[in-house]
Amino acid sequence: GQQLNQSPQSMFIQEGEDVSMNCTSSSIFNTWLWYKQDPGEGPVLLIALYKAGELTSNGRLTAQFGITRKDSFLNISASIPSDVGIYFCAGESNAGNNRKLIWGLGTSLAVNP
Amino acid sequence: KAGVTQTPRYLIKTRGQQVTLSCSPISGHRSVSWYQQTPGQGLQFLFEYFSETQRNKGNFPGRFSGRQFSNSRSEMNVSTLELGDSALYLCASSLAVLAGGHSYNEQFFGPGTRLTVL
């Protein structure tokens, strides 16, 4: 099935460093979503973006909805050990009342304390 | 409010067997989606049910099937298990969110069922 191009695939950083990951697509989306999956759990929504060009923050997280509606990035500032996990981007498209989510393959983040 | 629950949490089966996984969505959520997660393959969408009807379907073989009951609980069945079916199976119930005049679906995931096929 269709999938978003998410990069990098994995990152290993030192505590305190900033992190950046992004997703691109050949399709336009109405909404971009960023989820985080902690080890042993299901993903949880971090940030939802629904305006092209919009920059949204949630604590140390900042995400942007690309102006072309085909890309998004997520930044994490001053990383801490609990940031460890897999981060997924997802694009939502609307076809009438039928919403579909397309997922990236995830960015696995490891933080060295 | 209780979250999404999935049973069982862990399951070991052998090739050729069949398996049924269960998912109870958050109360009031009518949409349930199923995903297969394997290392490096992200979340592969299996299917979505809404009001007991399959609304969307991913690209999985017919061995994978599902259903939803009138109380929104959902089951997923895999017949004739293969080694490659070993994965974490995630269920998510969703709720439409209205923000700034825009509507999107937020998915709430369960902890998953870890299926191992030997």
Image: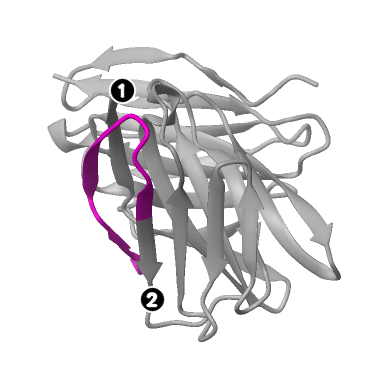
Q: Which residue lies at the image location 41% right of the left edge and 35% below the top edge? A: A79
Q: Which residue lies at the image location 42% right of the left edge and 49% below the top edge? A: A88
> Toward the viewer: B46 or A3?
A3
Reply yes or no: does residue B89 show up in magenta: no
The relative height of residue A92 versus residue B14 in the rendered view (above or below) is below
Relative placement, left or right, of B27 versus B36 is: right
Relative placement, left or right, of A46 versus B113 is: right
Mark 1 lies on a secondary structure that is strand
- Report, in whole angstroms, how far the alpha carbon at label 1 lies from the one at label 2: 31 Å
Residue, disc 2: A25
Reply yes or no: does residue A7 show up in magenta: yes
The quadrant holding residue A46 is top right
Residue A91 at x, y percent in the picture = 51, 65
Residue A59 at x, y percent in the picture = 62, 41
Q: Quadrant of the N terminus of chain B?
A: top right
Residues drawn in magenta:
A1-20
> Toward the viewer: A106 or A60?
A60
Mark 2 lies on a secondary structure that is loop
Residue B98 at x, y percent in the picture = 83, 59
Q: Quadrant of the C terminus of chain B?
A: top left
Colour setup of the view: one colour
Chain holding disc 1: B
Residue A112 at x, y percent in the picture = 25, 25
Q: Mark 2 is on which residue type?
A: Ser
Relative placement, left or right, of A110 versus B99 is: left
Residue, disc 1: B115
Chain holding disc 2: A
Q: Mark 1 is on which residue type?
A: Leu
